[in-house]
Image (spheres, rainbow, N blue to C red):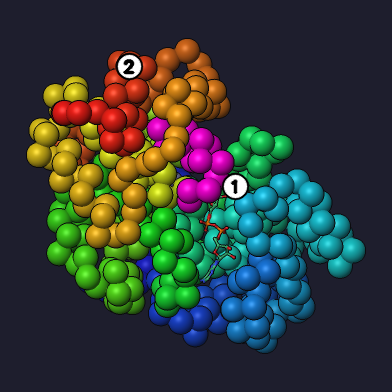
């Protein structure tokens, strides 16, 4: 199997393709279907990615389109807000972009989420394409149609479900990511294996060294297989009414730890910690054996992800869980593992169990 292309469905109909490539070369061919000769294209990117790939991508797009612009947003989550969206709207209006034109998101999840939101709302919706350039965006944010921005201190508070027309994942750009960003994206891959696919989990173990070396062919298979898991979940539950919650494995405590760290820890690092804690709780619920819990926890280590924390306040973490917008309606939907490769939604996890799991991360629990 070549792992070259994956079709994403929406409400039973084919919606868009994810193309996996090892360069930007095949982009021209993929763009042929979009009749760009009559359309303007605005490439939206961030200040880091602009320096790395914007020239190459805009070189390809310029040859095919009526006009090609590049709009650069300062890199970083702190710019994922309505002010950046307003700047983009202003640029599109002044450059006379119409509903027939197209946006391309070239960057990580921040750029993908913002460009998708601008595309969903500009003139009530124009087409957009994603070219995700981080591991996290290739395995997570470019599938499932969630777009949006942060509002004041609230993450992803404003947004829309809006599908791209194409996702073009050039796997070779992953080589340029710094080690922490790579590990952080990988945490979501491991999460996907843990919730749905034992065989993929075994494959990850077997390919540990190739993954760590960022061998492009290995990464291509890894990203493809991870995307298949997310695809199957979001296709069954596109608007997050049930099954999609499984993707939140490791995220309830993960988000709370991310906040308690003052966002000094990366999202994926906190997801790894959250997965350890949720696996510990799964063990307390007698779903996993102690050996399985310990195996899952130790699996993150060779991938340079943390499994312990220090200098964090347990009660602050628990308070953050209570204040999380996703946990707002009275009871907590916690995701546990029945076994490796099978997650379940559980509404019976107590505060005390979470406290125990956090104390274990802090190495404060004496014994299991
Ligand atoms: N829509 C969804 O379903 C969904 C899912 C998960 C996460 N997200 C969102 O994704 C965002 C995080 O995404 P991210 O981790 O990609 O962050 P990011 O977009 O901020 O990228 C991380 C950093 O890597 C840089 N970068 C990007 N590509 C690079 C490359 N190839 N080489 C070197 N540096 C590169 C960026 O400039 C940035 O500094 C968050 O805002 C989160 O809310 C959305
Ligand atoms: Zn996540």
Q: Which mark is residue 161?
A: none
The answer to which quarter of the image holds residue 161 is top right
Q: Quadrant of ligand 1?
A: bottom right
Magenta stretch bounds: 252-266
Q: Which mark is residue 147?
A: 1
- Horizontal relation, residue 184 to residue 88: left or right: left
Closer to us: 137 or 301 = 301
Q: Residues within 10 Å of mark 2 (few under 14, many from 20)?
A: few
Percent x, y for residue 283? 17, 29
Question: Residue at horizontal 51%, vertical 41%?
Answer: 261
Residue 367 on the magenta span: no
Q: Residues within 10 Å of mark 1 (few under 14, many from 20)?
A: many
**CA distance separating discs 2 and 1:** 35 Å
Residue 253 on the magenta span: yes
Disc 1 Cβ-to-ligand 1 distance below 8 Å: yes
Residue 84 seen? yes
Task: Work out which residue is located at the far right of the displayed protein and give it.
Answer: 94
For label 2, the residue is 352
- Horizontal relation, residue 206 to residue 273: left or right: left
Task: Work out which residue is located at the far top of the displayed protein and give it.
Answer: 330
């Amino acid at each position: 199997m070549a792992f070259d292309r994956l079709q994403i469905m929406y409400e039973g109909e084919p919606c868009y393709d994810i193309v996996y490539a090892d360069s930007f070369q095949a982009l021209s061919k993929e763009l042929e279907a979009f009749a760009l000769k009559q359309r303007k294209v605005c490439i939206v990117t961030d200040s880091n990615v602009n320096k790395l790939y914007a020239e190459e991508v805009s070189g390809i797009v310029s040859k095919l389109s009526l006009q090609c612009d590049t709009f650069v947003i300062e890199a970083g989550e702190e710019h994922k807000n309505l002010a950046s969206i307003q700047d983009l709207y202003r640029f599109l209006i002044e450059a006379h972009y119409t509903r027939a034109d197209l946006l391309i998101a070239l960057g990580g999840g921040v750029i993908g989420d913002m460009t998708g939101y601008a595309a969903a709302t500009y003139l009530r919706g124009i087409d957009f394409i994603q070219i995700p350039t981080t591991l996290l965006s290739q395995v997570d944010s470019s599938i499932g149609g969630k777009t949006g921005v942060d509002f004041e201190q609230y993450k992803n508070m404003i947004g829309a479900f809006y599908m791209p027309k194409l996702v073009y994942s050039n796997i070779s750009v992953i080589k340029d990511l710094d080690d922490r960003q790579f590990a952080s994206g990988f945490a979501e891959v491991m999460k996907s294996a843990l919730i749905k696919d034992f065989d993929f989990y075994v494959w990850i173990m077997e390919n540990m060294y190739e993954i760590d070396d960022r061998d492009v062919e290995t990464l291509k298979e890894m990203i493809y297989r991870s995307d298949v898991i997310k695809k199957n979940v979001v296709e069954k539950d596109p608007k997050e009414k049930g099954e999609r919650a499984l993707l939140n494995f490791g995220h309830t405590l993960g988000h709370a730890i991310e906040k308690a760290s003052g966002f000094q820890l990366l999202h994926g690092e906190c997801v790894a910690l959250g997965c350890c804690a949720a696996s510990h709780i799964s063990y307390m619920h007698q779903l996993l054996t102690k050996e399985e819990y310990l195996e899952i926890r130790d699996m993150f280590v060779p991938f340079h992800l943390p499994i312990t924390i220090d200098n964090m306040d347990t009660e602050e973490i628990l308070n953050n869980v209570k204040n999380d917008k996703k946990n707002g309606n009275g009871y907590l939907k916690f995701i546990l593992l029945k076994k490796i490769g099978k997650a379940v939604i559980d509404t019976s996890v107590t505060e005390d169990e979470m406290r125990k799991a956090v104390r274990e991360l802090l190495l404060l629990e004496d014994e299991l």
